[in-house]
Amino acid sequence: MNKKISAIIVDDERLARQALKSIISEVGLVEIIGEAEDVKSAIALIEETQPDIIFLDIQMPGESGFDLLERINTKAKIIFVTAYDEFALRAFEVNAMDYLMKPVSPSRLKATIARLNEEEPVNLEPRRKLCNDDRLFILFKSHYIFLKINTITHISSAGDYSEVFISDGKHGLTNKSMQEWEERLPENNFCRIHRSTIINIDTVLKVEDWFNNSFRVYLKGVEEPFTMSRRYASMIKGKMG
């Protein structure tokens, strides 16, 4: 999109609308052309303005953000802005472009708007380079959760899947390959230490010599150390400064 991107904000909380407008104005590229505090006024606003983007809260008095989507016919891209992560699966089902958690991170919003400006395909998890502030949608046992990239301690290969471990000890499966993770994770924060493991550099406690010219690396919150070659040990030390 070469023209200014038009957007509206639908949120019942005035302070939340003001906070989002402030961040959007700092990022640029997007012009807020209207606001609505409920579904009824949002429908009228969308019909009148035909925005490119709808920044949409989910839980509002009376009718929800999902109720709004059922009542309109629009080509606008939907970006959910909410304080709750339990609606993420349904957000996928309605083809939302993104799902931002309150309070909204300026860098996270900037990445989302950049994708709009480049006319990338609508996708909650586009194939872009991830940032440390990004959140991912991961299956943990029987339910899905959003987790921040910087809470990941390490990722291990699990056959055709990969297993993501986070700082509180939880872990869950994804269908991403190790190569996909390596390509998408921020390279300054993550490092592949051998074929089946990627670690978060920020969680490294120490690196020590081991047998046969190998090394062991210890991570915060992880009981057992990982073994790696001298080459990978040098890479980690280089990234740690």
Image: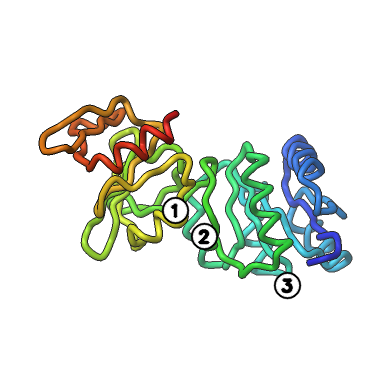
Q: Is residue 224 visible?
A: yes
Q: Which residue is label 1 attached to?
A: 137
Expressed as whole percent of the image width and height from the top left, the position of residue 24 reads 77, 45
CA gap between label 1 and label 3 equals 25 Å
N-terminal label among 1 and 2: 2
Type of the residue with mark 3: Lys
Type of the residue with mark 2: Glu
Q: Is residue 91 visible?
A: no
Circle 1 packing at 10 Å, graded few (<14), some (14-19), many (20+), is some
Q: Is residue 111 left or right of residue 201?
A: right
CA gap between label 1 and label 2 equals 8 Å
N-terminal label among 1 and 3: 3
Q: Which residue is label 2 attached to?
A: 125
**Residue at left offset 24%, top offset 53%:** 196
Expressed as whole percent of the image width and height from the top left, the position of residue 223 reads 20, 30
**Residue at left offset 16%, top offset 37%:** 213
Secondary structure beneath dot 1 equals strand
Q: Is residue 141 left or right of residue 82?
A: left
User: With respect to residue 217, does 185 lie above or below?
Assistant: below
Q: Which residue is label 3 attached to?
A: 75
Quarter of the rendering occupied by the N terminus: bottom right
Q: Is residue 88 left or right of residue 160?
A: right
Res 176 → quadrant: bottom left
Type of the residue with mark 1: Phe
Tag 1 and tag 2, C-beta contact below 8 Å: yes
Badge nearest the viewer, 3 or 2 = 2
